[in-house]
């Protein structure tokens, strides 16, 4: 299984995804500031993976305070959580794991600080393990939606690199392939940062799954040719009504899928559902540096300083989503998550 994050012998490692596919390199993360930087520059990315990373980042950041008073330890927990939470605003998994860690620390009223720290480490490992299990269940739940000989279009990267386990949308695809369904994947390159071309293509090669890389503007052409039986993508935040934020370009794919009568599926763990917001209008969309659009990995592809924008995500309205696949079940519209 491809994994983006490892806790080994009291040391935390992540795979630096900015270097893939040219280089597979693990880097050690020493504290919460290094983790926050790694999340911001997308060395580790994907909603479930950054949730897990934030939990371990908090543990690392609190390590120097295991001999401090409980008051200082808890105030550092709040301070470090804020730093980690503010790295990327869209994926709810970050605040979900950090809130879970805080709740645990606050519940251990009689425990000494070194024990609270140890329990937080166990909790981060537990969050990681739960994500592995959720990916497996999402993959199983999605199987009934995948026909034999299916052409499946996907966007961004939702595989092992983006999660603790097998992946979400890609986990469904990998499992369908392994069960002998003769799958062919169309991989959107996913501009501006090319998670599809760099990461999904790399993962599909590791898994030996047939695929074709397409630039994002080819999706309508591929769908009109009748080669796609489903579009499956992941999610960064799902509102109570099913509106879903995912990588920029997802909304356009959903519109195209509706027009071409291709089912459009979201696959995500329940940790990506935010029942506290009623609709996608409340989702904050991360704005990244506009240089990401003018350049591809430092190479200028537009005139110097030409105006550009780089929203990292868009929101697909629930009316365009055929089903949402979680580890619990397949949800069909109308969506109402609690
Ligand atoms: O900016 P990224 O690469 O973190 O965006 C990732 C996505 O949009 C994924 O589709 C989403 O996080 C789900 S990953 C299982």
Image (spheres, rainbow, N blue to C red):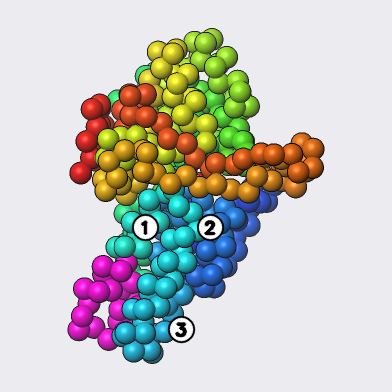
Q: Which residue corresponds to mark 1?
A: 95
Image quadrant where one finds the C terminus: top left
Distance of label 3 from label 1 (alpha carbons): 23 Å
Q: How many marks?
A: 3
Is 320 or 262 nearer to us in this picture?
Answer: 320
Is 183 or 220 nearer to us in this picture?
Answer: 220
Q: Residue at image x 54%, y 70%?
A: 33
Badge number at residue 39: 2
| Membership of 109 in magenta stretch | yes
In the image, 37: left or right of 152? Answer: right
Tell me the SS state at disc 2.
helix
Q: Residue at image x 44%, y 24%?
A: 254
The magenta region covers 101-120
Q: Residue at image x 23%, y 27%?
A: 334
Distance of label 2 from label 3 (alpha carbons): 22 Å
Distance of label 2 from label 1 (alpha carbons): 14 Å
Q: Which residue corresponds to mark 3?
A: 64
Indicate the quadrant where residue 148 lies. Answer: top left
Please tell me which of labels 2 and 3 falls first in the chain.
Answer: 2
Q: Are marks 2 and 3 in contact (CB under 8 Å)?
A: no
The answer to whether any part of residue 337 appears in the image is yes
Q: x, y (%) of residue 38? A: 56, 60
Q: x, y (%) of residue 304? A: 79, 42
Nearest-to-viewer mark from 2 and 1? 1
Tell me the SS state at disc 1.
helix
| Membership of 54 in magenta stretch | no
């Amino acid at each position: 299984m491809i994994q983006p994050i490892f806790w080994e012998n009291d040391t935390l490692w992540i795979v630096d995804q900015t270097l893939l596919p040219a280089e597979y390199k693990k880097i050690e993360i020493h504290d919460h500031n290094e983790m926050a930087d790694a999340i911001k520059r997308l060395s580790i990315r994907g909603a479930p993976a950054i949730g897990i990373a934030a939990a371990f980042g908090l543990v690392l950041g609190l390590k120097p305070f295991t001999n401090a008073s409980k008051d200082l330890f808890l105030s550092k927990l709040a301070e470090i959580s804020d730093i980690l939470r503010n790295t990327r605003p869209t994926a709810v998994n970050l605040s979900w794991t950090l809130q879970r860690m805080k709740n645990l620390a606050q519940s251990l009223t009689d425990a000494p600080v070194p024990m609270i720290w140890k329990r937080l480490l166990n909790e981060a490992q537990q969050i990681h393990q739960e994500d592995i299990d959720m990916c497996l269940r999402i993959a199983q739940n999605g199987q009934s939606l995948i026909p034999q000989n299916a052409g499946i279009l996907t966007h961004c990267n939702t595989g092992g690199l983006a999660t603790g386990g097998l992946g979400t949308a890609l986990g469904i695809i990998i499992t369908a392939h392994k069960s002998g369904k003769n799958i062919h994947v169309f991989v959107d390159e996913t501009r501006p940062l090319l998670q599809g071309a760099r990461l999904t293509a790399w993962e599909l090669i590791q898994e030996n799954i047939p695929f074709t890389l397409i630039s994002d503007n080819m999706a309508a052409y591929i769908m009109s040719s009748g080669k796609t039986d489903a579009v499956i993508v992941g999610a960064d935040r799902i509102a109570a009504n099913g509106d879903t934020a995912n990588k920029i370009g997802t909304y356009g794919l959903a519109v195209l899928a509706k027009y071409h009568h291709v089912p459009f599926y979201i696959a995500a763990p329940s940790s990506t559902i935010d029942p506290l917001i009623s609709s996608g209008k409340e989702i904050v969309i991360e704005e990244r540096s506009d240089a990401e659009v003018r350049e591809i990995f430092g190479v200028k592809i537009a005139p110097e300083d030409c105006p550009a924008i780089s929203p990292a995500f868009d929101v697909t309205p629930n009316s365009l989503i055929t089903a949402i696949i979680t580890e619990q079940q397949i949800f069909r519209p109308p969506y109402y998550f609690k």
